[in-house]
Amino acid sequence: MTAPIKILFVDDEQLILSALRRSLRREGFELYFTADPSAAARLVGEHQIDIVVSDYMMPEQSGVEVLALIGRLHQHTVRIMMTGQADREATIRAINEGNIHRFIEKPWDDAELKRILHEVARSIQVRRQSEPRSADQRPHRTLVRDGTGAIVIKTAALDRA
């Protein structure tokens, strides 16, 4: 049996996160949600997230910054930008800095969102089957603060028996 695809949604608007939760609850994915963009990379490491869907415009960090950090820490995590402010400059920046796999415009079409997520999930499942190591054995990275308040990247192999 293959592990379910884990998807993290990052958006500063709780109403958006609630709508996504309602729309996707029966799709067979393991879903995670956060309104805190600074928590996204930590959650990806802790839960071995396969796909991150991030809003573009957020008060603390842009979605490009969030997805770029996740790309550096977790290169196998597929990154998707969801935005209502799609302009050419933002698109180019997201592609170049965040290595974005797809763009989804707000307001999104539920059927199209589900189709995109299932398509990406299928490609992840194929990749998992062709990798010499299972997905559960890939390096586990997480961000933590040490005693001085500095951010530290911790890396460890997960052993799930």
Image: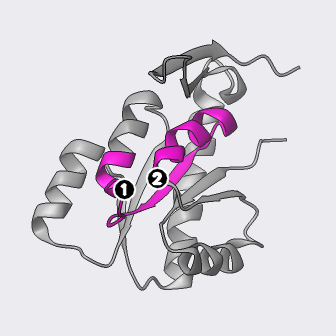
Q: Is residue 129 magenta?
A: no
Residue numbers of the magenta segment: 37-66
Q: Position of residue 153 (x, y in %)?
A: 49, 20
Residue drawn where x is 64% and y is 36% of the image? 48
Magenta stretch holds residue 63 = yes
Q: Badge 2: few (under 14), some or many (20 or more) residues near its Cα, within 10 Å?
A: many
> How far across and how far down the image is residue 113, in percent?
51, 74
Residue type (three-letter) at the residue carrying disc 1: Glu
Count of all numbered marks drawn on residues in the image = 2
Label disc, if present, on residue 37 of the rendered structure: 2
Q: Secondary structure at mark 1?
A: loop
Q: Is residue 85 left or right of residue 8?
A: left
Residue under the image location 66 percent in, 50 percent down: 6
Q: Amino acid at mark 2?
A: Pro
Judge from the rendering whether residue 98 lies leftward or rightward of residue 39; answer left or right: left
Name the disc covering residue 60, or none.
1
On the image, which quarter does residue 58 sit in?
A: bottom left
Label 2 element class: helix
66 is higher (above) or lower (below) than 75: below
